[in-house]
């Protein structure tokens, strides 16, 4: 009799729980050896990964996937090398497991310490970007967690090829192959199963479009690290340096339009709009960006089309930018806190006090001063990689790396004390 999706996932769950017990006690050397071997396997199997990705790309094009989705799906030589380098970067990170966060002694002589421990089993549900397979697997492994990875059906062949490299690494490191697993099917029922695997999966990280995250948020009985949207802003303050304003804005929008850290709305102080905006928008239009502007923006740039009310609340993930002229810092902060998604927002200014106010009062996981919103990435933060961005305020916020994939426990040492 053919196994059902429920049976398959139950078996994967049992393997993950067993592996998590081993990983929680694994040495740093063993985990690092597995990561380095996996990186070597990615390089040695480059051609096989590229061939698998070509198969996914061809299927994606036949299905009519959009340009941004296809860009997320693509694995060229540079991205394959970046995956291998990312595994090496994670191996080079300090091992968080077992580190003592605090310790103290009570008047009765009890010695108490708070120590980092793995979460256990981490489920990751993601769309299109097959490099997440390597990043998520590596981060979970370094933090001592087992991982169940469910990539999108459009990246199934690419992710399977990457999984083979991770399995090779685990074998080389002497760690359980069940430490990182990917369901061997594209059946969508897998997602529903993962969302109900309480007692097996300790936390789920959704990475994908709004509809996927909304579904997972509504249906999951397992705790989540998540963000719903990346409605990111770049704000050109009255004291912005014109050269920085042009460079940062162009990069923040157009470097990669399909990532969650891409700027979707540009705000400009009215005091400098006439001087700054024409050159900034000309750069963007020349790069292929559609501008949707308010009346003040359209008066300065006739190629802009009218922005609707909905544009201020839209994550385009495309070469489209909404642009608004604001009355100053207070207006900019109010707009972002009203229309943003608490993900990533930037200010361009030479006024340090204005920058500090912006970074303190904008209620987002990441705020930047004179830098592109596209730096919203765990790798760029020195975390080696990230399993995702969390906009929640409990446990993890911002890029979720190895430290955020741990919890802690208390160890209490006594000499026979009893409580009166």
Image (tube, helix red, strand yellow):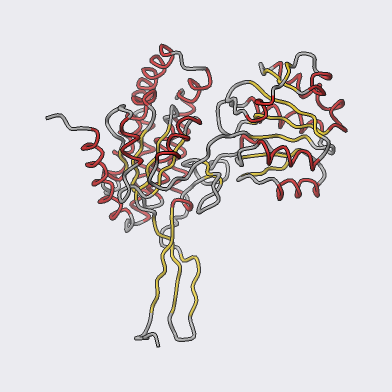
Task: Identify the image quadrant of residue 315.
Answer: top right
Q: Position of residue 155 (x, y in %)?
A: 39, 25
Question: In screen coordinates, is 147 left or right of 382?
Answer: left
Q: Position of residue 182 (x, y in %)?
A: 31, 35
**Most distant residue in the bottom direction:** 420
Residue 104 vertical placement versus 171 (above, below): below
Residue 278 vertical placement versus 372 (above, below): above
Q: Residue at x 62, y 28 (%)?
A: 314
Question: In screen coordinates, is 50 left or right of 321?
Answer: left
Q: Residue at x 88, y 33 (%)?
A: 271
**Most distant residue in the left direction:** 1
Classify the position of the C terminus by image quarter: bottom left
Q: Position of residue 191 (x, y in %)?
A: 35, 34
Viewer-nearest residue: 216 or 82? 216
Task: Identify the image quadrant of residue 318.
Answer: top right
Q: Position of residue 203 (x, y in %)?
A: 40, 47
């Amino acid at each position: 009799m053919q196994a059902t999706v429920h049976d398959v996932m139950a078996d994967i769950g049992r393997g993950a729980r067993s592996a998590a017990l081993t990983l929680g006690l694994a040495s740093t050397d063993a985990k690092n050896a597995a990561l380095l071997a996996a990186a070597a396997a990615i390089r040695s199997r480059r051609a096989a990964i590229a061939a698998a990705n070509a198969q996914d790309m061809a299927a994606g094009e036949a299905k009519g996937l959009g340009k941004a989705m296809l860009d997320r799906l693509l694995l060229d030589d540079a991205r394959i090398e970046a995956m291998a380098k990312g595994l090496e970067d994670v191996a080079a990170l300090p091992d968080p497991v077992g580190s003592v966060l605090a310790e103290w002694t009570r008047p009765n002589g009890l010695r108490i310490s708070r120590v980092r421990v793995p979460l256990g089993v981490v489920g990751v549900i993601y769309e299109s970007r097959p490099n997440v397979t390597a990043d998520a697997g590596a981060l979970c492994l370094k933090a001592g967690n087992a991982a169940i990875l469910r990539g999108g059906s459009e990246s199934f062949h690419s992710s399977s090829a990457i999984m083979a490299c991770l399995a090779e690494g685990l074998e080389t490191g002497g760690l359980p192959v069940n430490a990182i697993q990917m369901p061997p099917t594209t059946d969508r029922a897998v997602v529903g199963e993962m969302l109900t695997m309480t007692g097996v999966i300790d936390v789920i990280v959704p990475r994908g479009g709004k509809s996927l995250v909304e579904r997972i948020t509504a249906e999951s009985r397992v705790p989540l690290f998540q963000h719903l949207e990346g409605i990111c802003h770049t704000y050109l303050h009255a004291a912005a340096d014109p050269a920085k304003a042009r460079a940062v804005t162009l990069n923040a929008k157009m470097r990669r339009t399909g990532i969650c850290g891409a700027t979707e709305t540009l705000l400009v102080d009215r005091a400098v709009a006439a001087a700054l905006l024409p050159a900034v928008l000309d750069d963007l239009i020349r790069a292929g960006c559609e501008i949707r502007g308010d009346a003040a923006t359209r008066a300065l740039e006739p190629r802009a089309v009218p922005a609707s009310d909905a544009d201020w609340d839209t994550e385009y993930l495309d070469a489209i930018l909404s642009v608004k002229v604001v009355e100053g810092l207070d207006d900019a902060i109010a707009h972002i806190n009203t229309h943003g998604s608490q993900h990533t927002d930037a200010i361009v200014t030479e006024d340090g006090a204005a920058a500090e106010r912006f970074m303190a009062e904008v209620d987002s996981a990441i705020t930047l001063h004179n830098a592109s919103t596209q730096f919203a990435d765990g790798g760029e933060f020195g975390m080696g990689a990230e399993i995702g961005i969390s906009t929640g305020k409990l446990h993890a916020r911002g890029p979720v790396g190895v430290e955020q994939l741990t919890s802690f426990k208390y160890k209490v040492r006594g000499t026979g004390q009893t409580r009166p």
